[in-house]
């Protein structure tokens, strides 16, 4: 039977919330709930707190598992209407609940987390009761986990909005009740935001609101259901990129005035030795194959969207075998700029346009894998930082192209 | 005129930076250690802090954390003779870092980038 809300303890007010969004997470949700409960007891015991599961009306028993876990902290289950899916839709419900409960601080953690500890709740939550309005996670991830973050979301967001937030789509973060109100009232909501676009949307809005942002050091790596970057990522890629591009249109007056980037405060040191993440296997053959397939599927779009030089370069790269494969960062940046302008000018159906970027992204990922395969995680981080510098240096080119109007 | 605070326990480095950066048109103030650094920043209101990482009595990365927590947007450039400091995650709270050298071209570039960095009010 569908229930929009289950609030067994009839909680009407709460200062602190830990929220866990889910869709069919019956197998995994118990662990983060237990860790959140311990974290609340250890570090927020003096506050009126609640754990909320915001769900997409899962049919696998997520609700029953969540409500059945024995916790000291009261729990509330809320759900979207039957048939309404998407992580962003869960958050919309959550924002309203935060406002209703008049909460001061909220921590969100993924339901499939296997490495969460009670300390994560402290580190993501405590800064919200100091001077910060948004807390992004900082964890050691395997160099091939989070390739959309590494190649696009981090460098692009950093160069656009001037804040260095290493995990802008980390999935685990904290925000103030005040910011929840801002999110609820913001009019840039789209279908993509209703789904996987929600994380980058929240981070970008926080930056545009000049919310004091800090990064919380988690100490342990994020261990969850990591995906091979070569596997099917269509919807997520479309929704994250679509949200970034859409927000660029809305927030042009802000980002066009940002020069270079600034670091953010770091919270939560002293957690002992940092644990290394488990390996993520990448299938290089699949990445190369998908890039090659892209020519037959999308070259008609690329010809229309890309500037001539970039198109010629792609043709050169097409001839490379896996051994010699190299995709220069500056070419990647120029291609992204071409796609940004094409998206803005609606030069092609936007979903198809974003899909057509996937094979090029695959080739950039292959090049990253090849360049960093002998590097340690720290060295690959330095490599990404160097790429970010190139993104920031290309900002003038982006502004020029943006101001000059129509695409290629 | 932009004001630069140089924090370094080596006197010759403070002298070199003072001379060269003054010639480049900056007002330079110095500190030989991290003692009461936060108070000094509050009092002197520098536009950029240049911070040595390895000082005899102070760890520059710990000082960086203190600066960052108190002065959210204060540009800080880390100076070091070695790049092993990057193994410490705290180093990411710096705006830039430079390897110590008698040629200050790189440092001057970073100062100018730090001064140029701006984030508009929403």
Image (tube, rainbow, N blue to C red):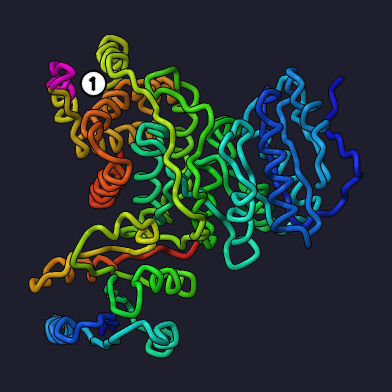
Q: Position of residue A207 (x, y in %)?
A: 49, 55
Residue A296 location (% of width, % of height): 27, 9
Q: Determine which quarter of the picture holds residue B43.
A: bottom left
Q: Which residue is mark 1?
A: A303
Q: Is residue A400 visible?
A: no
Q: Residue at x 44, y 48 (%)?
A: A274
The quarter in which the N terminus of chain A is drawn is: top right
Q: Nearer the viewer, residue B67 or B48?
A: B67
Residue B31 position within the rendered picture, expressed as x and y whole percent measured from the top left: 30, 87
Question: Residue A353: horizontal and vertical position, in percent?
Answer: 38, 23
Residue extent of the magenta highlight: A314-323
Quadrant that contains the C terminus of chain A:
top left
Query: Is residue A90 part of the magenta span, yes or no?
Result: no
Q: Residue at x 42, y 48 (%)?
A: A166
Residue shown at 28%/63% (left/top)? B96
Residue lying farthest left? Answer: B103
Q: On the image, which quarter does residue A196 sit in?
A: top right
Q: Is residue B17 visible?
A: yes
Residue in the foreground of this view, choosing between A220 and A99: A220
The answer to if A320 sits in the magenta stretch is yes
Horizontal placement of B122 versus B25: left or right? Answer: right
Q: Give the class, few, some or many, for how many residues have Cα within 10 Å of label 1's Cα (few <14, many ≥20).
A: some
Q: A44 or A55: nearer the eye?
A: A44
- Residue situated in front as seen by the camera: A197 or A350: A197
- Report which quarter residue A292 is drawn in: top left
């Amino acid at each position: 039977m569908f229930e929009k809300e289950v609030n067994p303890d009839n909680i009407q007010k709460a200062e602190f919330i830990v929220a866990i969004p889910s869709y069919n997470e019956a197998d995994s949700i118990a662990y983060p709930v237990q860790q959140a409960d311990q974290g609340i007891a250890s570090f927020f015991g003096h506050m009126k707190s609640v754990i909320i599961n915001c769900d997409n009306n899962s049919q696998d028993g997520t609700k029953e598992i969540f409500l059945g876990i024995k916790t000291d902290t009261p729990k509330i289950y809320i759900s979207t209407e039957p048939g309404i899916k998407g992580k962003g839709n869960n958050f919309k419900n959550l924002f309203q609940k935060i406002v209703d409960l008049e909460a001061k601080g909220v921590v969100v953690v993924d339901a499939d987390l296997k490495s969460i500890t009670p300390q994560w709740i402290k580190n993501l939550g405590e800064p919200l009761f100091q001077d910060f309005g948004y807390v992004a996670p900082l964890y050691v991830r395997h160099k091939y986990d989070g390739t959309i973050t590494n190649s696009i979301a981090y460098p692009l967001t950093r160069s656009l909005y001037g804040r260095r937030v290493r995990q802008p789509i980390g999935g685990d973060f904290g925000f103030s009740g005040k910011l929840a109100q801002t999110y609820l009232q913001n009019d840039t909501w789209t279908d993509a935001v209703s789904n996987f676009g929600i994380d980058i949307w929240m981070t970008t809005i926080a930056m545009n609101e000049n919310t004091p942002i800090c990064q919380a050091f988690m100490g342990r790596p994020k261990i969850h259901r990591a995906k091979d970057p070569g596997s099917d990522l269509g919807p997520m890629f479309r929704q994250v990129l679509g949200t970034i591009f859409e927000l660029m249109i809305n927030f042009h007056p802000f980002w066009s005035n940002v020069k270079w980037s600034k670091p953010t405060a770091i919270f939560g040191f002293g957690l002992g030795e940092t644990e290394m993440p488990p390996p993520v296997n990448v299938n290089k053959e699949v990445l190369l194959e998908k890039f090659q397939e892209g020519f037959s599927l999308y070259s008609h779009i690329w010809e229309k969207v890309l500037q001539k030089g970039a198109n010629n370069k792609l043709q050169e790269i097409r001839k490379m075998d896996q051994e010699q494969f190299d995709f220069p960062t500056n070419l990647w940046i120029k291609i992204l700029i071409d796609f940004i302008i094409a998206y803005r000018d609606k030069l092609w159906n936007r979903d198809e346009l974003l899909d057509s970027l996937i094979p090029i992204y695959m080739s950039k990922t292959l090049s990253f894998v090849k360049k960093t395969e002998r590097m340690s995680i720290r060295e690959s981080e330095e490599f990404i930082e160097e790429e970010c510098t190139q993104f920031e240096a290309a900002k003038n080119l982006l502004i020029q192209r943006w101001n000059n109007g129509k695409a290629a | 005129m932009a004001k630069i605070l140089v924090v370094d326990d080596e006197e010759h480095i403070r002298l070199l930076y003072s001379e060269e950066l003054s010639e480049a048109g900056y007002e330079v103030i110095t500190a030989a250690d991290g003692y009461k650094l936060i108070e000094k920043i509050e009092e002197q209101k520098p536009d950029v802090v240049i911070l040595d990482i390895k000082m005899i009595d102070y760890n520059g990365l710990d000082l960086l954390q203190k600066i960052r927590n108190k002065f959210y947007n204060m540009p800080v450039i880390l100076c070091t003779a070695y790049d092993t400091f990057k193994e410490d995650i705290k180093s990411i709270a710096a705006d830039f870092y430079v390897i110590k050298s008698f040629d200050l071209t790189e440092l001057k570039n970073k100062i100018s980038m730090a001064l140029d960095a701006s984030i508009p009010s929403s």
